[in-house]
Amino acid sequence: FIGNASHELQTPLAILGTRIEWMIDNTTLTEEQFAELSKMRQSLHRMNRLNRTLLLLSKIENNQFPDRADIDLVEIINSEIGIYSEIYGDSGIRCNTEMPQHFVVNMNESLATTMITNLIKNAFLHTGENGTVDISIRKRQLVIANNGSEALDSTRLFDRFYTSGKKGSTGLGLALVKSIANSYNFEIEYSFKGNRHCFIVKF
């Protein structure tokens, strides 16, 4: 899905998606046919998401995000907490924060948002019902910790397509985080202690 191949796929994928939507909205379907088309639509959405993410990875690795600005990560974090707290509201997950009023980093705004979004999404995704997500910023380090039952594979954690089996995961979120961190010479670490996953980004 990288390079020219991605452009070749965009039009066929878009056409296929349009046809599926048309069939669902404009034809009389049996329950079995509707279920099958719905599965096809879900698979298509996943392919589109994979395609977009792989394109983004390729652009990051080729330094195609030269624009930089002073970005307040606290503002982005609070926004993402609101989004994922709502999405996972039925799970009873609580999010605790310990952050300064502002924490400014000089980087591309789009990449800053992508990095924070994927770290917070990952924390909520891997937290069980009634668990907690803790986010703190101290000494120019962002720490995101959450409940877990067993450690992730630290040797493969940031590899593309590595997943722990969680439904809805593409296996690219943490690969994106690592790629962004590398492009700015940030350090990122993972540990598992006391039944808690912990990610640390050192700026």
Image: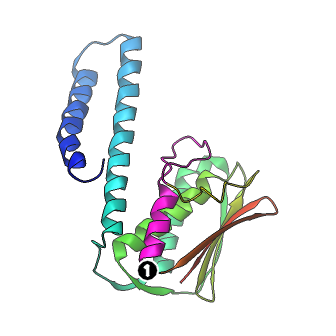
Report the residue at 21% width, 43% height from top.
10
Query: Quadrant of residue 188 in the image?
Result: bottom right
Q: Which residue is mark 1?
A: 184
Q: Nearer the viewer, residue 65 or 130?
A: 65
Report the residue at 75% width, 52% height from top.
150
For the question of whether residue 133 can be seen, the reply is: no
Count neighbours of disc 1 (C-alpha within 10 A) and say few if under 14, some if 14 to 19, many if 20 or more.
few
Q: Which residue in the rendered view is the most extreme toward the top?
A: 30
Up-down: is 163 above or below 42? below
Question: Quick check: 56 left or right of 133?
Answer: left
Question: Quick check: 116 left or right of 164?
Answer: left
Report the residue at 71% width, 66% height from top.
191
Query: Quadrant of residue 67 in the image?
Result: bottom left
Q: Amino acid at mark 1?
A: Tyr
Q: Position of residue 148 (x, y in %)?
A: 73, 54
Q: Position of residue 167 (x, y in %)?
A: 56, 40
Q: Nearer the viewer, residue 103 or 160?
A: 160
For the question of whether residue 113 can be seen, the reply is: yes
Span colored in magenta: 160-183
Report the residue at 31% width, 73% height from top.
63
Up-down: is 72 above or below 80? below
Asked if the stretch drawn in magenta spans residue 177, the answer is: yes
Q: Position of residue 128 (x, y in %)?
A: 70, 49
Q: Secondary structure at mark 1?
A: loop
Q: Which residue in the rendered view is the most extreme toward the right?
A: 194
Q: Position of residue 159 (x, y in %)?
A: 52, 56
Question: Quick check: 129 left or right of 73?
Answer: right
Up-down: is 149 above or below 183? above
